[in-house]
Image (cartoon, rainbow, N blue to C red):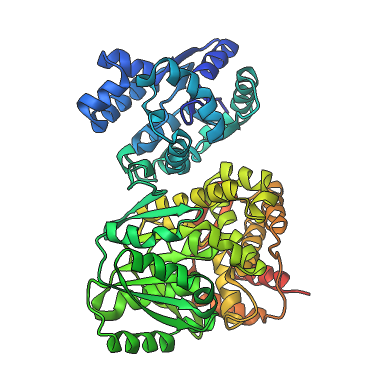
Amino acid sequence: MKRAQRIILTGFSGSGKSEVARLVSERLGWQAVDSDDAIVAAAGKPIPAIFRDDGEPHFRTLEHTVLSQLCSQPKMVIAAGGGAVLSAENRRLMAQGGFIVCLEARPETILERLRPQFESDPVARPLLATADPLRRIRELKSFRQPYYALADHTVHTDGLTMDQVAAEVVHAWRELSATALADAGRPAALAAAPSAREADAPYSAPPGATCVVRTTSATYPVFVSWGALPDLGRLMADAGLAGRAYLISDSMVHARWGAAAEEALRTAGLQVAWHVVPTGETSKSLETAATIYDWLVSQRAERGEAIVALGGGMVCDLAGFVAATFARGLPLVHVPTSLLAMVDAAVGGKVAVNQKEAKNLIGAFYQPRLVLADVSTLQSLPPRELISGWAEVIKHALIMDEELLRLLEENAEAIASLQPAVTTEVISRSVALKAAVVSEDEREETGRRTILNYGHTIGHGLEAAAEYTGMLHGEAVAVGMAGAARIASRLGLLSAEVAERQNALIARFGLPLRASGVDPAKVMAAMALDKKVKGGAIRWVLLEDIARPVIGRDVPPELAEEVVAELLSA
């Protein structure tokens, strides 16, 4: 097999693409080109001037033209612009005969590298022209991360010299590029994710927002920070929500955070009414929803008056279901207080109640008006529930973002103990990944959002078989991910090393890899009723590698039964 005749370096500004391209070209005897320099030469003016005078669409057209020219030439090392990967057609061009390497760096490293350039020429680095440049880097990098993760290989540049990075790029090209090019479906696969615009990036959101979810049915901001709850009323007012607010919570959350939430709302001039449900998954039912309908009728709730879901995933799902169905829709605000709710249930618009045989079977897609996640509320979670929530964060890293996975691996103890800075960063990144996927595929029509079900086929089966008692959602998903890795390994999709890396991180956060006390036959029966079943076959989400999920229906039933039995054996 022939190696690639081009190496394309992607990554954020400050990752070292231009210098590494030069060093790699010297080692290989090739030509090095910076695509941004080529764009400036073609346009006759600096890139900030192109954005200012002509707008982003014109810049992206120039960028595509330049990349088309560069990607038609052999023996080239191309340093691509930081946002070039946002275009599906650019990714296709890069993949056709080229080997794509992403240069990764932490936001702190990027800021340290870019600051001298900004101080000498602020116009050249408008990214840093803000009161909080580190936050801006984090937000924009989180927005781009799913696209950077599509590279054939990633080099983590923190702590390395540019010579060391160049050596790693050359080594990866020699060892991996021929195999990458042999995959005929690779260009189409890289182009499968829709194009995005920098104008849609999180830093364009309302002040303080971590990201924005943009779907065909709604656009709304997500706020993630430490100590954010007092801002609830102000943010609702900014979103045009006034009058009465109907807070729905469970008994435990109401006792701990109800007064603070009510004060935030009343301070902003909203009237408040409460409905508190028993804590636990058994409250997520049609019967409980009916009692809330009756309460709203007694309150004479009107359209335009918001339901505020204050609590964990159960409350977000239940209150969202009520908001979607009462009076044909009331505005919905999510205030998640559990980790699971912050990174999963509150973002994406899936609202539902359980049916006896299956979880979330009765529901709808209904987007909130805003989401406010106060990370400090996690301090009041029972340890087991907090641990359970890390399963969804780990899942996001496994299916979309190796850099987030590395952050979890290197800071597991600090994150598990809720050290404010790193915990907020991890949760913000996880939320931004979820928001990006939901924005691409709100209703699971293209298949993109389906990847979020990694670990959930077996996980939901476990929960249903246990009748939603005895096992928390994250615990079930953790076991489900362990099962999915076993299946993928036995199908020859996933290496033993990656499966072990996954399982080691799951265990390090205190999550289970096996379950007990559940009938395997009941699990299989519940899996057959899962929402992901299509044409009578389960659509499994499996991994080929970190950030390489695949969706398929070709898992032999006997293999699934075998793995489920192993997971449930004593």
Residue nearest the observer in this picture, 304 or 545: 304
Residue 297 falls in image quadrant:
bottom left
Q: Is residue 444 left or right of residue 269?
A: right
Q: Position of residue 15 (x, y in %)?
A: 52, 27
Residue visible at 34% across and 58% down in the picture: 235
Q: Is residue 517 left or right of residue 210?
A: right
Residue nearest the observer in this picture, 294 or 408: 294
Does any portion of residue 545 appear in the rendered image?
no
Residue nearest the observer in this picture, 300 or 462: 300
Locate the N terminus and report the quarter of the image it occupies.
Answer: top right
The answer to whether residue 454 is above or below residue 22 is below
Q: Residue furthest right?
A: 570
The answer to whether residue 399 is above or below residue 453 is above
How many numbered badges does the structure rendering display? 0
Q: Residue furthest front?
A: 267
Q: Is residue 433 left or right of residue 363?
A: right
Locate the C terminus and report the quarter of the image it occupies.
Answer: bottom right
Q: Position of residue 117 (x, y in %)?
A: 46, 18
Residue 96 falls in image quadrant:
top left
Residue nearest the observer in this picture, 55 or 176: 55
Residue 334 falls in image quadrant:
bottom left
Q: Position of residue 295 (x, y in %)?
A: 34, 87
Residue visible at 41% across and 54% down in the picture: 223
Does any portion of residue 24 appear in the rendered image?
yes
Q: Position of residue 307 (x, y in %)?
A: 34, 73
Residue visible at 32% across and 61% down in the picture: 236
Q: Is residue 268 left or right of residue 555?
A: left
The answer to whether residue 115 is above or below residue 186 is above
The answer to whether residue 155 is above or below residue 308 is above
